[in-house]
Image (tube, coloured by chain):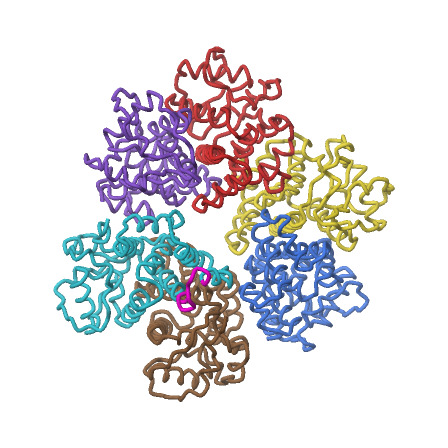
Chain colours: A red, B purple, C cyan, D brown, E blue, F yellow
Amino acid sequence: MARTNRASKRRGKTVAARSALKVVKGSSPAGKPDRESAASRDDTEITALGLKRAPLNPAIEAYFAKCEEKLGFVPNVLTAYAFDMAKLEPFVAMYNDLMLAPSGLSKLEREMIAVAVSAQNRCYYCLVAHGAAVRQLSGDPVLGELMVMNYRAARLTKRHRAMLDFAVKLTAEPWLVEEPDRAALRKAGFSERDIWDIAAVAGFFNMSNRVASATDMRPNSVYHAQAR
Amino acid sequence: MARTNRASKRRGKTVAARSALKVVKGSSPAGKPDRESAASRDDTEITALGLKRAPLNPAIEAYFAKCEEKLGFVPNVLTAYAFDMAKLEPFVAMYNDLMLAPSGLSKLEREMIAVAVSAQNRCYYCLVAHGAAVRQLSGDPVLGELMVMNYRAARLTKRHRAMLDFAVKLTAEPWLVEEPDRAALRKAGFSERDIWDIAAVAGFFNMSNRVASATDMRPNSVYHAQAR
Amino acid sequence: MARTNRASKRRGKTVAARSALKVVKGSSPAGKPDRESAASRDDTEITALGLKRAPLNPAIEAYFAKCEEKLGFVPNVLTAYAFDMAKLEPFVAMYNDLMLAPSGLSKLEREMIAVAVSAQNRCYYCLVAHGAAVRQLSGDPVLGELMVMNYRAARLTKRHRAMLDFAVKLTAEPWLVEEPDRAALRKAGFSERDIWDIAAVAGFFNMSNRVASATDMRPNSVYHAQAR
Amino acid sequence: MARTNRASKRRGKTVAARSALKVVKGSSPAGKPDRESAASRDDTEITALGLKRAPLNPAIEAYFAKCEEKLGFVPNVLTAYAFDMAKLEPFVAMYNDLMLAPSGLSKLEREMIAVAVSAQNRCYYCLVAHGAAVRQLSGDPVLGELMVMNYRAARLTKRHRAMLDFAVKLTAEPWLVEEPDRAALRKAGFSERDIWDIAAVAGFFNMSNRVASATDMRPNSVYHAQAR
Amino acid sequence: MARTNRASKRRGKTVAARSALKVVKGSSPAGKPDRESAASRDDTEITALGLKRAPLNPAIEAYFAKCEEKLGFVPNVLTAYAFDMAKLEPFVAMYNDLMLAPSGLSKLEREMIAVAVSAQNRCYYCLVAHGAAVRQLSGDPVLGELMVMNYRAARLTKRHRAMLDFAVKLTAEPWLVEEPDRAALRKAGFSERDIWDIAAVAGFFNMSNRVASATDMRPNSVYHAQAR
Amino acid sequence: MARTNRASKRRGKTVAARSALKVVKGSSPAGKPDRESAASRDDTEITALGLKRAPLNPAIEAYFAKCEEKLGFVPNVLTAYAFDMAKLEPFVAMYNDLMLAPSGLSKLEREMIAVAVSAQNRCYYCLVAHGAAVRQLSGDPVLGELMVMNYRAARLTKRHRAMLDFAVKLTAEPWLVEEPDRAALRKAGFSERDIWDIAAVAGFFNMSNRVASATDMRPNSVYHAQAR
């Protein structure tokens, strides 16, 4: 089966700066975009599905350009969705709102949830990409590994432990989540809105993990060495 | 804890017909909107979180009006997200694209995936709302019950069985999904794009199931009696 | 493989009223027996096993007649067992004692256990038949759906929650049931005899669920629309 | 909590030989009834529930007498049920039909199913009582241990392996049992009626295991040393 | 595939008494070594792997001789490892230190852990061999069966229950073991060193169970009847 | 609770080169021992148990010195066992034989098994230490991450896939490992002895994972950045 969703196609895109869409900050490798890694062979086939990339609409073209400018690469999950702008746009909007918009949860906390959920689901793509984000945002490479390997082994604050316990239970056995689980979050200092955000981030990665696993999505190789 | 996300607040909204957003067809109770049920007491508190509804922006106001016009009610999941337009808009856009836009999967097939996934996750909200959709779109109340109870007991075509086996494995053990699973879908006649759609619908309900379970989201009571 | 266990054979039976066996009350569709549904095509093959119906003995003949009279149909599980009177008789006797005889548990409570256990085991036959009974006995169609979908989402009394928690744990992980589980029932007001009854009803449906799943037993189609 | 269901109370019962109920043969300790063991302290409290034994009706009195005569003891499960003749009678009738009546399955095969199912459910009572029966009926103490510990480690015929694979799958994941599982039994030589019997025996012990676990039922100590 | 790891080869070994290695006491059948059983046909092929026994080095030769002298047989696990002295020696040294050296845990307690862990892993070899050891060391055949069948059904002291709960959780879900689990052991009176010993014995049998299951290792038949 | 098992205590040991014990090669950070990391604060408390380090015997003293010389540090697992030479010596001997002695499995293959098993058990210590070994021995940092995250996502040879499938099944459900599993290894080219080695390495890490989890063992921080 041919794989045509090639990341190499994204080379040569114009860099339009006017995009209103926020760029996925926090994944930028400490100001040193590693364009060599991003163009390596492993990145040329992003999914197991032979979906042809659609023409980018102006908003997405600008957004991808901004990714290239700030990160040095377009995350492969975006390229994977780029066979259909009608799918890519709400995915980007939802992702950016959940992970980057103002929230009672810090960006690092949201990335910690992303990785703990992805570890429960053993999702290679998300563990690589968001493990890098935890290392970068925390400046603590070991924290990134702990989230990937077993968040229970980390020396977490009560707040963070409650947050991850909720997110992982919601991932593994959502039918068992009940009022006492929400009460534990409130006791740890989370607001009603924070509870929504924890649930929504955990939910989002339960979606993304499955799209990635279903399509054998491969992460940009640049992530592996980031912020070690 | 106070619950302020009251569906009753949505009463009295102007009905603007100009929305570009598609209405969730297929959930309409056979042309007989049951406004009484939609306003019943069970619907007044939609989630366990005390989130205040934000002012609707024009696009969402028009969309909700269209829901009222065509379905006779606004689905509670939309009201639940209405505390923040930045969250509601991409949710609606993603939902409508996945469930209503042109696809190699029929709308009924997409609803069958929704229910089989929600049954694996034992999500009350989604089983009620999308169980009703399966009954309605298929004209077969028993099919709706089979999807809720155990899709393996249904007399399915090979195509539908392969589709649901993939979606449910992806839900229960996403880390085990590999090339042979995709090959089984191709053998059952699904295209590369169809495989994406199966994965994306299954993924979406793995997200929604968890947001609903985390917040104890309650379905509009009107669904229960629809299309029995 | 031929299926000869046809429900249609039961037509034309004499209706003897002298049976000492109690009829499964509570499954009667509100005094309006739907004989058309009971005779529909879906009911003609009850199990995947080609077992020939044995001649009914007088007691069972009277009992089946009483079912027809009061319910409008003979429940398919009885027809399935009717290849051997030596199997059918104790099954009926045990069922009637457990579900209909005097007990500290109401008939509705016993049916709630039946459905919550069958949901854990995802048994199509029992969910359909006893889901209908919960709807009927409670007069609350939503309660029936909650028992089928996730009893934890129902607004239950402490008594009912304790009862179902015990029954479902006993179903899923019987080896973990210990004194604290019994103590929780006593604390919720259940007597020693009530605890036996909860265990016995849960046990019975763990048996029936498996006989039904092993034989692909199909419920009478009349159940689906009952008491919605 | 007082335990009044004392086996010691059964002493002094008249031994009426006219019972039509079959005695549970095969549990008899090789013609050497060990009345001492049967009366030991471990046997005085059979369940964790303080249920008072009811007066035996004549049929059960005769049956218990026959047990004493042939086995040297009344199996504790019968004494546990003896608080209510309406529960004990169908239990005995169902048990005797399933385990002792003519069938395409030998009595040993039925006991093998009983033990393999009880091992999956880790039911102490049934493993002790029916492990003894396997040892006795087979004359092979090691076979009894294999059924208790891991039937997959036994050197079984294809027939026995298929039989136990079906019974254990039906126990652990009944919702996954489908036509290919029945086809595997047919391929191993089992008739339609045999399949019913395998399912019914497996189902029965899924019931009994749970009643025993729920009530902390203790086996007669005489079983332990039988047929070693 | 030929099986050459024959226990029969061990016949005729000289009995050297000078071994510094301790013999696995506690498995000796009450001073009555049953050499007939040990030489039975079941013992002639110990694993499914056709590994040829290596020449014993003097230390192991002496050790095996001591086993023959004290137990009447060489445990099959030792014969299984005897294809390579470099593997057998540290296995014996580790085993003897863990199970026989001075410890805050009695030898019986260590054997109870061995059996409860092996029951969780359903390891036939270890359940047979160490079930016998529990019977022997405790003088209580029923305790041996309880450890094999379901340790939760045993009437254990708080100390023993805490010990086995820790060992079995560590076996089934090691990633969930945390400080509260260690605290429960301390509360039950175990020292820091005792906690290590519980973990080390549980860990050792998680290793041995897997080597035995992977190779289909068969226990010496002499164990079955020991200390019944 | 005091933690006295301080790695800092190991400073100042004489470096005796005469040890016959092999040093754990392959964990050496590319010839650049990072003594700073090895002495960092995270390393000062290795386990949650307050076990005092015993005096090293000459063989172990020499072995530790060799570790310091070749790796730049003593792996924390060795320090953790160093409260008792009788436990440390066979652990080192078994480890070195399994992981470093001649075998049909390459050292990298044995480390791949170590990591895949530890990922199943979510063991932080072993994932960190042996993940580094896979990166180092393979020269492929991505392979190390794949073994940690989900070995099924790696592009493995048939040989390696069969090897890891066996090891992980043996870890997760050892009771299901049977002749077809061994046959799959033989078909992939593994010898009888190779099968033993796969089982023994998988078994060993099932032991080590549990000792590490039970004691909250912390890896030397130097591993994290090795061979990225």
Q: Main secondary structure of the magenta part?
A: helix
Which is more toward the observer, E76 or F10? Answer: F10
Residue at point 62%, 75% (across, down):
E227
Residue at point 66%, 54% (across, down):
E199
Residue B91 left/right relative to C177: left
Residue D179's place in the image compared with D141, above or below, is: above
Q: Return the x and y of residue F126 as percentages of the image width and height.
A: 65, 43
Residue E13 left/right relative to D71: right
Q: Residue furthest front?
A: B2
Q: Quadrant of the N terminus of chain B?
A: top left
Q: Quadrant of residue C129?
A: bottom left
Residue C181 left/right relative to E22: left
Q: Return the x and y of residue F100 as percentages of the image width and height.
A: 71, 44
- Residue B159 visible? The answer is no
Q: Return the x and y of residue D80 as percentages of the image width and height.
A: 43, 74
- Residue F55 visible? The answer is yes
Q: Residue F121 colored magenta?
A: no
Magenta residue span: C186-196
Which is more toward the observer, E181 or F86? Answer: E181
Q: Quadrant of the C terminus of chain B?
A: top left
Residue F22's place in the image compared with D10, above or below, is: above
Residue D147's place in the image compared with B23, above or below, is: below
Residue C199's place in the image compared with B190, above or below, is: below
Q: Return the x and y of residue F111 as percentages of the image width and height.
A: 64, 41
Residue F77 left/right relative to D214: right
Q: Residue C195 colored magenta?
A: yes
Number of residue marks: 0
